[in-house]
Image (spheres, rainbow, N blue to C red):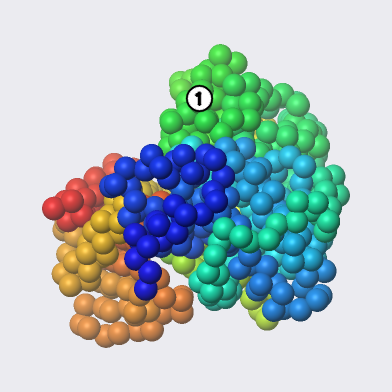
């Protein structure tokens, strides 16, 4: 094993680009281990981390190295794979375009066909592009909604879904075999590179057009519905607006400041719909115009957040779980009405998402499949349905504001979500009601579902270990009770087992993952897992009760007890 000091010395001797060389020279002793102890790991959504010098940060060297590994994986798959090629897109972050260029040049040096956009595009469009062009793989340069210091590299397989761990392993193995990352050949002439732009924009937008369920409704209400859209300085800026226009919406305002493409994300702390503050500026706009709705897409436009106007003129920020539940209800109601609801319909969600949408789906005779965190697992399930023809995919979502309505993209798609959600607003408006009323109906029918995710930060090399220790502590402790509720079952996804109170053990279908989930006697659940995109431990709580007050009370008491255990 090479030590981090040896790796550091190699980088010192290498002929680095000026900015990286300067950064290396200025690196404080304390930062060396963190930046040099490993090659960046692949997590929930590809490789993601701080931009900076060293193999454990993202820079032109690490991008060249991982692309060289991807190229040799493609080489191994033969000439057809090389001809089918790779689609590359990038977002508005600092260095994103530069990293995309490095990736293009490395692939081109291998004689691999490359399809590139000349400017930024959303992640779901890249996913669609891979499928549409029948490419062999895809690369999206983005760190999604992470802080501005970060960037990342999402890798896609030929189905347009992010590569699942088994496929990624081949790339990681190839990367480990690269001795010298500094002399990787790059074809500066980009001989195999073609610019795609409208070649993919047009068919993607044509597919997005099919998301609208009720054209007549949009024609009637589309002009009256007033809403505010923010692309949060990112890729939704162009395609998002096009999608809204072609769907028939005209009475919207774009948050001007946030339509400026800017990797500093100057108007927000984090460009993350999970943070209600990310919607603040858009809500200010909405208040001025008494708009019905606020929608925002994250910088790579795969997540969508929303806030809705209440009767008193204030705005309620919805959770990803609530948005998904409303969408499921809307889509399935429409299908039932038009008698197009298949008998084998299914929705797919993650093990840390609410049961709210599943309960709604169940009332329509639609099944729910639960997969691990990571939209790639939802994409893999879609492929499974298509191969086995046993279920018809109707919807997929994650609590973290990701939804996929139609699988022409195989990743969460905030552009699709934008169009559908605006239509849903028109639907409520036509009835003289609001989203809040709609949610209330569903709560009355299915129970008051409430969820909360708390993320604890554990930065650096030691943070990694601390999270591992905490997970081990929970595994040893074997929780019997949380507040006043018995733990009826404990699921440990690392050993793929579910254990009940009397010790009976059941095997679980999901692949191995470092996640613990507890099911309480009242139907509530609690899950714990280290994030795979940021150095954080996530605690998820999901409760269900007969009233909002009861749900609030439960959530608060479980949170208090679990937070105490995490922090003590
Ligand atoms: O960041 P995005 O929008 O690409 O989203 C990525 O990260 C989310 C959070 O993952 P984690 O809890 O491991 O941080 C996942 O739910 C999602 O599937 C993945 O694509
Ligand atoms: Mg994103």
Q: Which residue is mark 1?
A: 267
Q: Quadrant of residue 405?
A: bottom right
Residue 407 locus on image (x, y percent):
69, 60
At 32% from the left edge and 55% from the top edge, which residue is drawn? 33
Is 91 above or below relative to 136? above
Q: Quadrant of residue 6?
A: bottom left
Q: Position of residue 478 (x, y in %)?
A: 18, 71
Extreme residue in the front direction: 13
Is 194 rendered above or below residue 157? above
Residue depicted at x 54% and y 56%: 62
**Outermost residue, top side:** 288
Tell me where residue 270 appears, x and y as whole percent: 45, 35
Q: Position of residue 538 (x, y in %)?
A: 34, 54
Name the residue: 19% across, 48% down: 560
Depth order, front residue of 446/193: 193
**Quadrant where the image shows the N terminus:** bottom left
- Residue located at (21% from left, 77% from top): 501
Number of marks drawn: 1
Per the image, label 1 sits on a secondary structure element best described as: loop
Asked whether 190 or 322 is in front, the reply is: 190
Q: Is residue 241 left or right of residue 96?
A: right
Whether residue 99 is visible, yes or no, is yes
């Amino acid at each position: 094993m090479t030590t981090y000091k040896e790796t550091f010395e190699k980088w010192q001797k290498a002929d680095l680009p000026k900015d990286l060389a300067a950064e290396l020279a200025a690196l404080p002793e304390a930062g060396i281990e963190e930046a040099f102890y490993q090659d960046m790991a692949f997590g929930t959504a590809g490789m993601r981390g701080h931009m900076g010098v060293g193999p454990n940060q993202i820079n032109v060297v690490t991008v060249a190295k991982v692309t060289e590994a991807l190229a040799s994986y493609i080489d191994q798959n033969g000439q057809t794979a090389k001809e089918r090629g790779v689609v590359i897109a990038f977002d508005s972050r600092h260095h994103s375009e530069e990293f995309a260029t490095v990736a293009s040049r490395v692939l081109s040096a291998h004689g691999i066909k490359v399809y590139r956009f000349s400017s930024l595009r959303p992640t779901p469009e890249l996913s669609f592009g891979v499928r549409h062009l029948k490419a062999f793989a895809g690369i999206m340069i983005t760190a999604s909604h992470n802080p501005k210091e970060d960037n990342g590299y999402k890798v896609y397989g030929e189905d347009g879904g992010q590569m699942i761990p088994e496929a990624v392993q081949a790339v990681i193995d190839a990367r480990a075999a690269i001795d010298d990352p500094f002399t990787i050949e790059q074809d500066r002439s980009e001989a195999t590179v073609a610019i795609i732009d409208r070649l993919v924009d047009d068919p993607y937008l044509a597919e997005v057009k099919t998301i609208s369920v009720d054209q007549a409704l949009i024609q009637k209400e589309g002009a009256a519905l007033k809403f505010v859209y923010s692309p949060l300085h990112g890729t939704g800026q162009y395609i998002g607006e096009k999608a809204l226009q072609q769907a028939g919406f005209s009475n919207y305002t774009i948050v001007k400041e946030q339509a400026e493409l800017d990797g500093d994300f100057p108007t927000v702390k984090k460009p993350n719909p999970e943070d209600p503050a990310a919607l603040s500026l858009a809500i200010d706009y909405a208040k001025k115009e008494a708009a019905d709705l606020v929608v925002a897409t994250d910088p790579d436009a795969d997540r969508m957040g929303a806030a809705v106007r209440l009767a008193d003129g204030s705005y309620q920020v919805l959770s990803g779980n609530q948005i998904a539940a409303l969408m499921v209800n809307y889509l399935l109601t429409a299908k039932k009405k038009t008698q197009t609801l298949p008998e084998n319909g299914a929705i797919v969600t993650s093990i840390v998402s609410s049961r709210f949408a599943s309960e709604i789906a169940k009332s329509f005779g639609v099944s729910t499949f639960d997969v691990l965190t990571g939209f790639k697992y939802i994409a893999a399930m879609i492929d499974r349905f298509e191969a086995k023809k046993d279920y018809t995919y109707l919807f997929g979502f994650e609590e973290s504001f990701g939804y996929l309505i139609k699988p022409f993209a195989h990743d969460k798609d905030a552009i699709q979500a934008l169009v559908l959600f605006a239509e849903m607003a028109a639907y409520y408006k036509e009835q003289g009601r609001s989203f809040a009323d709609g949610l209330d109906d569903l709560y009355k029918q299915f129970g008051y579902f409430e969820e909360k995710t708390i993320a604890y930060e554990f930065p650096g090399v030691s943070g990694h270990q601390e999270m591992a220790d905490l997970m081990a502590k929970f595994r040893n402790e074997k929780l019997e009770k949380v507040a006043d509720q018995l733990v009826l079952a404990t699921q440990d996804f690392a050993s793929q087992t579910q254990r009940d109170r009397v010790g009976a053990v059941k095997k679980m279908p999901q692949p191995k993952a470092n996640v613990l989930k507890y099911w309480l006697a009242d139907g509530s659940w609690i899950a714990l897992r280290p994030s795979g995109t940021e150095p954080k431990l996530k605690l998820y709580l999901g409760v269900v009760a007969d009233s909002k007050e009861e749900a609030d009370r439960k959530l608060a008491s479980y949170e208090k007890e679990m937070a105490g255990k995490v922090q003590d």
